Image (cartoon, rainbow, N blue to C red):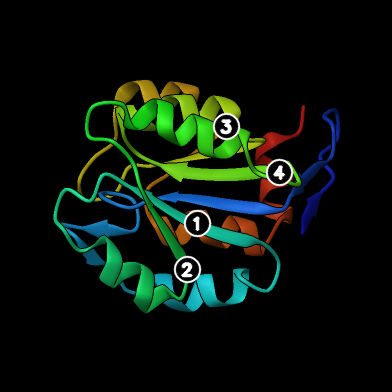
């Protein structure tokens, strides 16, 4: 578990990390450099899941390379699938990282949501719903590995 005490807010207890794939962990379906190493370290602290509509058809390969579970979401109702996935996690407490319109409901269910702008861009609504916005997936993962950075950004 990743535990983060943020002044003026309830403590965050993050048992799970839920990741969008396209535009977040990958560019054009290809894993972004540095992600594998960071997720390897984060796996020691939380359960990690990959949720994707698998637009480029590389989801299974990416999940295998990362040593994490992949769950395919609907092309039409992926937003609902992602939100339901987080709602069903036990114990509760998830961080969610994404960039798309289908990540909005997932962001609402997550205890911590991080939007990644990245090379494929980011849906404007995701920027507004996220707790934090970063330019690169490695920056998002580094926030979870170095929680003091979260405190500086999220304190009231």
Please report the residue visible at 50 percent of the width from the left and 53 percent of the height from the top: 140
Around disc 1, counting alpha carbons within 10 Å, would you say few (fewer than 14), some (14 to 19), or many (20 or more)?
some
Please report the residue visible at 37 percent of the width from the left and 68 percent of the height from the top: 63
Q: Earlier in the sequence, mark 3 or mark 2?
A: 2
Q: Earlier in the sequence, mark 4 or mark 2?
A: 2
Q: Depth-wise, is mark 1 or mark 3 nearer the camera? A: 1
102 over 150 or under it: above or below: above
Q: Quadrant of the C terminus?
A: top right
Percent from the top left, x then y, of residue 85?
A: 52, 39
Q: Secondary structure at mark 2?
A: loop
Name the residue beneath numbered marker 3. Answer: 131
Is residue 79 rendered to the left or right of residue 153?
Answer: left
Percent from the top left, x then y, of residue 120?
A: 20, 46
29 over 40 or under it: above or below: above
Total tally of numbered discs in the picture: 4
42 over 154 or under it: above or below: below
Contact? badges 2 and 1 (CB < 8 Å): yes
Mark 2 to mark 1 CA distance (whole Å): 6 Å
Contact? badges 3 and 4 (CB < 8 Å): no
Name the residue beneath numbered marker 1. Answer: 49
Q: As rendered, which of 126 and 52 lies closer to the eye? A: 52
Is residue 67 rendered to the left or right of residue 136?
Answer: right
Q: Earlier in the sequence, mark 1 or mark 4?
A: 1
Contact? badges 3 and 2 (CB < 8 Å): no
Contact? badges 4 and 2 (CB < 8 Å): no
Q: Depth-wise, is mark 1 or mark 4 nearer the camera? A: 1
Mark 3 to mark 4 CA distance (whole Å): 13 Å
Is residue 100 rendered to the left or right of residue 37?
Answer: left
Mark 4 to mark 2 CA distance (whole Å): 30 Å
Name the residue beneath numbered marker 4. Answer: 152
Name the residue beneath numbered marker 2. Answer: 68
Please report the residue visible at 31 percent of the width from the left and 69 percent of the height from the top: 62
């Amino acid at each position: 578990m990743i535990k983060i005490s943020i002044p003026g807010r309830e403590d965050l207890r993050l048992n799970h990390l839920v990741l969008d794939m396209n535009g977040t962990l990958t560019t054009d379906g290809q894993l972004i450099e540095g992600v594998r190493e960071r997720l390897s370290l984060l796996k020691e602290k939380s359960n990690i899941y990959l949720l994707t509509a698998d637009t480029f058809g590389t989801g299974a390969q990416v999940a295998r390379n990362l040593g994490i579970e992949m769950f395919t979401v609907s092309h039409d109702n992926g937003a609902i699938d992602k939100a339901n996935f987080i709602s069903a996690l036990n114990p509760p407490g998830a961080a969610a990282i994404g960039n798309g319109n289908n990540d909005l409901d997932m962001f609402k269910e997550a205890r911590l949501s991080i939007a990644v702008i990245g090379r494929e861009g980011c849906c404007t609504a995701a920027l507004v719903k996220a707790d934090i916005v970063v330019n690169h997936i490695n920056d998002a993962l580094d926030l979870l590995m170095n929680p003091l950075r979260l405190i500086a950004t999220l304190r009231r």
